[in-house]
C-alpha cells in the first residue's frame, strides 16, 4: 500500500475531500441534487473511513483511492439515471453473430470477424454512460476481441460478396481465410448456376440479396492479389475464391467463402433485402416458410440447398 499523507487536515476531512473530487470527476456538469450528492459522499466516505480506522492507519492509500473511484462512479451513475431515465438504446445495424469487416488500421487496414457483443460499457468513459456498439472477435490467425467505437460504414461494414464498390478486391483479399480449404473441396454451385449473392445495398449501411449467374468456380485472383499485397503468398488455393458471379443488374462480384450467408440458390432465396433499416434480417441457414403454392409449409436449408415438407409453426405436430 502507498499511503497519501494527511498533514494539515483531519483524517475524516481528507477522506471526504477525496470522495468529493471523485464525484466531481463523474458528475462534471454538477447535475446531482444536494441530497443525492450528500448520499454518495457519506456512503463512500463512511466506508473508507471505517476501513482506515479498523486498520489503524492515518492516511489514504492506493487501494482506498481505487475503491473511492469505483464506488463513486457506480453511485453517481445510478443517481443520474434516476433523474433522467436512460434513453432507449440506439438502433444498431448488426446483431450478435453477424459477420462484419472492421477497420483495424495498420498495414492490414480491414479484417473480418463475428459480432460477439453489442452495447458494451465503454471502459474509457469515466461517467459510465457511453456504450460501445460492438465487440467483434477477429478471424484467425489474429483471433482477438476488438471494440468497435462507432456504428458507421467507415469503421464497420457488412461482410458481403465484394465487387460493386471501389477497392472491392482489397476487401475480398482481406476477408479470404488465411488457411483456405483445399482447392479440390466440393463446391455447392457450378458454372451457370443461378444464385443470390449478398451485396451492399444502395445505402452501404445494409445488405441485399442480388440475383446472378456463376461465371467461374475456384476463380484465381492470384495475379491481381500479388500486385496489391506482394508480401503474402498467393499460389494455389490461397489465390482462389470459390466463385465469380455476374450480377443480373450488371457487374461482377467475388464470393470469398462458400457459405450460405454469402451465396444461396436463387430458387430458394429470391432477390430482396438481406438486412435493412426496417428490421429485415434474412441470414439464417434454416428457414421455415410457406411453400410456393401456399398449400403447406416447408423447411429450407440454405447451405445444403435441400427442402422438405414440415408442420406449420405452433401446430400440435410441431410441439411433439
Image (cartoon, rainbow, N blue to C red):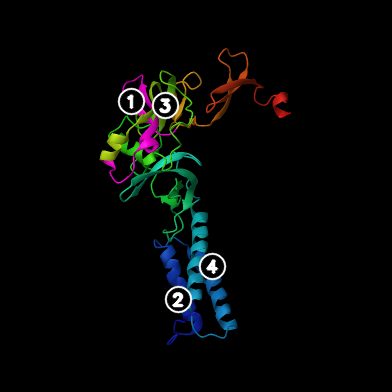
Instruction: Name the foreground residue: 46 vs 269.
Output: 269
Label 4 – label 2 distance at C-alpha: 14 Å
The label on residue 252 is 1
- Give the crowd class for mark 1: few <14, some 14-19, many >=20 residues within 10 Å: some
Instruction: Name the foreground residue: 109 vs 316.
Output: 109
Q: Is residue 245 magenta?
A: yes
Position in image of residue 203 (x %, y %): 35, 32
Foreground tag (4 vs 1): 1
Q: Is residue 167 visible?
A: no
The part of the chain drawn in magenta is 228-257
Q: Is residue 240 magenta?
A: yes
- Identify the residue position indicated by label 2 in the image: 17
Q: Is residue 229 left or right of residue 50?
A: left
Label 4 – label 1 distance at C-alpha: 64 Å
Foreground tag (4 vs 3): 3
SS at badge 2? helix
- Give the crowd class for mark 4: few <14, some 14-19, many >=20 residues within 10 Å: some
- Identify the residue position indicated by label 3 in the image: 197
Labels 3 & 1 near each other (Cβ < 8 A): no
Label 4 – label 3 distance at C-alpha: 59 Å
Residue furthest out toward the bottom? 8
Residue at 57% x, 22% y is 306
Foreground tag (4 vs 2): 2
Foreground tag (3 vs 2): 3
SS at badge 1? strand
Amino acid at each position: 500500500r502507498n499511503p497519501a499523507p494527511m498533514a494539515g487536515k483531519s483524517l475524516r476531512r481528507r477522506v471526504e475531500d477525496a470522495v468529493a473530487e471523485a464525484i466531481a470527476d463523474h458528475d462534471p456538469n454538477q447535475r446531482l441534487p444536494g441530497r443525492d450528492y450528500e448520499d454518495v459522499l457519506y456512503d463512500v466516505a463512511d466506508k473508507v473511513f471505517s476501513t482506515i480506522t479498523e486498520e489503524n492507519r492515518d492516511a489514504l492509500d492506493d487501494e482506498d483511492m481505487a475503491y473511492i473511484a469505483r464506488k463513486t462512479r457506480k453511485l453517481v451513475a445510478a443517481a443520474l439515471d434516476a433523474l433522467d431515465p436512460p434513453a432507449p438504446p440506439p438502433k444498431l445495424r448488426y446483431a450478435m453473430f453477424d459477420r462484419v469487416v472492421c477497420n483495424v488500421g495498420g498495414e492490414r487496414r480491414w479484417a473480418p470477424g463475428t459480432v460477439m457483443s453489442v452495447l458494451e460499457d465503454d471502459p474509457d468513459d469515466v461517467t459510465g454512460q457511453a456504450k460501445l456498439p460492438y465487440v467483434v472477435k477477429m478471424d484467425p490467425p489474429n483471433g482477438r476481441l476488438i471494440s468497435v467505437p462507432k456504428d458507421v460504414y467507415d469503421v464497420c461494414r457488412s461482410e458481403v460478396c465484394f465487387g460493386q464498390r471501389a477497392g472491392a478486391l482489397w476487401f475480398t483479399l482481406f476477408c479470404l481465410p488465411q488457411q483456405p480449404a483445399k482447392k479440390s473441396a466440393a463446391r455447392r454451385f457450378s458454372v451457370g448456376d443461378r444464385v443470390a449473392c449478398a451485396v451492399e445495398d444502395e445505402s452501404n449501411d445494409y445488405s441485399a440479396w442480388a440475383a446472378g449467374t456463376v461465371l467461374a468456380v475456384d476463380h484465381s485472383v492470384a495475379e491481381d492479389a500479388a500486385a496489391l499485397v506482394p508480401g503474402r503468398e498467393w499460389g494455389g488455393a490461397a489465390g482462389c475464391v470459390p466463385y465469380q458471379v455476374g450480377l443480373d443488374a450488371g457487374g461482377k462480384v467475388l464470393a470469398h467463402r462458400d457459405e450460405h450467408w454469402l451465396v444461396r440458390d436463387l430458387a430458394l432465396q429470391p432477390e430482396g433485402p438481406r438486412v435493412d433499416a426496417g428490421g429485415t434480417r434474412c441470414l439464417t441457414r434454416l428457414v421455415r416458410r410457406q411453400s410456393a403454392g401456399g398449400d403447406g409449409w416447408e423447411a429450407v436449408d440454405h447451405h445444403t440447398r435441400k427442402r422438405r415438407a414440415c408442420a406449420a409453426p405452433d401446430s400440435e405436430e410441431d410441439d411433439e
